[in-house]
Image (spheres, rainbow, N blue to C red):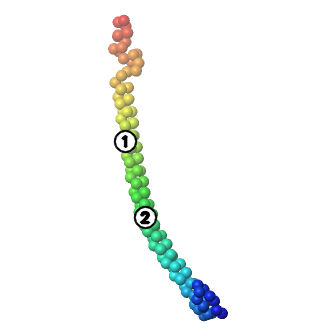
Amino acid sequence: MIMVVDGFLYGGDDVQKLYFILIGSVFILSILFAIVIWRQTIKFEKKARAAKQAKEEYLKQLMLEQEEEERRLAELRLQEELLEEDAAISQPSEPENNPEAKSKDHNE
């Protein structure tokens, strides 16, 4: 079989060789693309791992800060409660229990 491609005459064997060259070049290009994709996947995996570690460290730091804030707020509440108790103890609530208040009431 004789074939004309781009003005050249090709016999049957030449067409078969061109077909195999085409298949081989597509195969080689496919392998090259696979290698490129594989390398990019490795790079992406490294970046993702680093981002995950940074996220975990950030979350640990955030948890520590929240625990510290909770401790500080609990301490402030405790101090407020103690101040309220001290104020309640130092100021009698009813004049009946306070002898000084009774004497002032009787004088008026």
Q: Residue at x 39, y 33 (%)?
A: 81
Q: Residue at x 48, y 76 (%)?
A: 35
Residue 47's disc is 2
Q: Mark 1: which amino acid? A: Arg
Instruction: Name the residue nearer the viewer: 31 or 8.
Output: 8
Tell me which label, 1 or 2, sits earlier in the chain: 2
Q: Is residue 81 above or below residue 53?
A: above
Q: On the rendered image, what quadrant is the C terminus found in?
A: top left
Position of 24 compared to 74: left or right? right
Q: Residue at x 40, y 54 (%)?
A: 58
Q: Percent position (x, y) of residue 48?
A: 45, 63
Q: Is residue 78 above or below residue 23?
A: above
Residue 7's disc is none
Number of numbered markers: 2
Is residue 19 visible in this depiction of the protein?
Answer: no
Q: Residues within 10 Å of mark 2 (few under 14, many from 20)?
A: few
Q: Quadrant of residue 17?
A: bottom right
| Front: mark 1 or 2 | 2
Q: Is residue 97 above or below residue 40?
A: above
Q: Mark 2: which amino acid? A: Lys
What residue did someone put label 1 on?
72
Q: Residue at x 64, y 92 (%)?
A: 2
